[in-house]
Image (cartoon, helix red, strand yellow):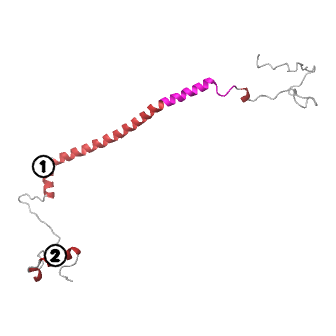
Amino acid sequence: MSQARPRRGRSGGSRRRTPSRPVRAGARGSADSRPGRRTTRRPARSATARRGPRFTGQAVLLGALVLLLALTLAGPLRQYVAGRQELAELAAEQEALTQRAAELQSQLDRQSDPAYISQEARERLTMVLPGDRLIIVGDAGDPGDTADAPAQDARQSGAVPWYEALIGSVAAADGDPPGTDD
């Protein structure tokens, strides 16, 4: 049965007769063409009512296969991403180690130079070559001060008993000026 042709029969078995006079276009089935007469036209079915079921067996099977494929590939894909991240970290570490090796090689080359060794010995060990003059500048205070040792007190020049020396050292450790006895 073709869907292009409308059904002619009704469930009651009676046939509807068409009028013998011609009908104007657009007036057929309208309520104002014949007053008092019911229209037999059915409302058009919606597009969703004509469709079959939303999910067919093939669609469900296809969805299950896609889900199974996604679950199967999730583990290896995660391992691949983790491996790529680890490779990036190792490449960065390798670059840092290469730079450190270059710095150490330049330091080794510099330390094998006799001029560098001589310079470091002069600075660290205050080495003086024959014919050079060594001048040590100390903190003497004001420019008018002399570098001579201060005159000693007559009291300190004599022998001091051990207990007074002990008390004096404790007072000096506390920050009291020497010579102030309580």
Residue at the spot of label 1? 114
- If you read the primary sequence from the N terminus, does the residue marked by circle 1 or circle 2 appear first? 1
Q: What range of the chain is rendered magenta? A: 52-72
Residue at 47%, 30% in the rendered image: 73
Q: Is residue 77 visible?
A: yes
Asked if 97 appears above or below 33 in the picture, the reply is: below
Quadrant housing residue 101 = top left
Residue type beneath disc 1? Pro
Asked if 6 appears above or below 70 in the picture, the reply is: above
Query: Which element carries disc 2, helix, strand or loop?
Result: helix
Coordinates of residue 25 in the picture (x, y in percent): 86, 25
125, 179: nearer the viewer = 179
Quadrant housing residue 133 = bottom left
Task: Give the quadrant of the N terminus.
Answer: top right
Query: Which element carries disc 1, helix, strand or loop?
Result: helix
Residue at 75%, 30% in the rendered image: 46
Q: CA distance from mark 1 to mark 2?
A: 52 Å
Residue type beneath disc 2? Leu
Q: Is residue 143 visible?
A: no
Residue at the spot of label 2? 166
